[in-house]
Image (spheres, rainbow, N blue to C red):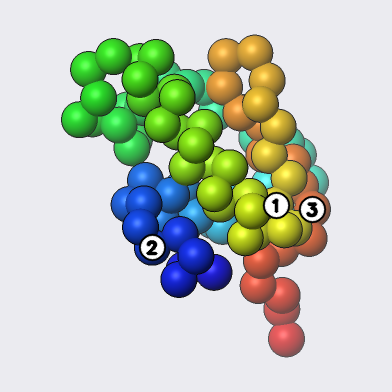
Amino acid sequence: TLRAIKASSLALDFYAWLAYRHYRATRSKKPVFVSWKQLQAQFGAAYNDPKNFKRNAKTALRKVLAVYHHLQVEEVRGGISIVPGFPLITSR
């Protein structure tokens, strides 16, 4: 998985962050909404234009979703929604 997205540091950041957030959403059995503004504050400090960040974030998110098949992320008005589902790492 990491080999497939290694060329994009934003995709690597999203992958690690989404693995954790998806796990938390699955444990609580509640979807998690994260606004584009919150995502830019966490990942896009170098981006001055929110539209530029959003465009790059969507590209990185598509890369992550291509390799993280169990992840359920929906783009909703104003951000993304992380839907509970099958975790990346299962319990023993």
For residue 71, the mark is 1
Contact, mark 3 vs mark 1 (Cβ under 8 Å): yes
Q: Which mark is residue 3?
A: none
- The reply to whether residue 82 is in sight is yes
Q: Could you tell whether 31 is left or right of 78 in the image? A: right
| Amino acid type of the residue that numbered disc 1 sits on in the rendered structure | Leu
Residue 82 on image: x %, y % = 67, 39
Question: Which kind of residue does numbered mark 3 sit on?
Answer: Gly
Q: How far is the residue under mark 2 from the one under mark 3?
A: 25 Å
Against 50, residue 19 (above or below) is below
Q: Residue at x 39, y 14 (%)?
A: 51
Q: Secondary structure at mark 2?
A: loop
Between 49 and 87, the residue placed more toward the observer is 49
Q: Is residue 70 above or below residue 10?
A: below
Say which mark, if any, is on residue 85.
Answer: 3
- Front disc: 1 or 2: 2
Type of amino acid at the residue the image marks with label 2: Lys
Q: Quadrant of the N terminus?
A: bottom right
Q: Position of residue 57 (x, y in %)?
A: 45, 33
Label 2 environment density (alpha carbons within 10 Å; few <14, some 14–19, many ≥20): few
Secondary structure at badge 3 equals loop
The residue that appears at 30% across and 31% down in the rendered structure is: 44
2 or 3: mark nearer the eye: 2
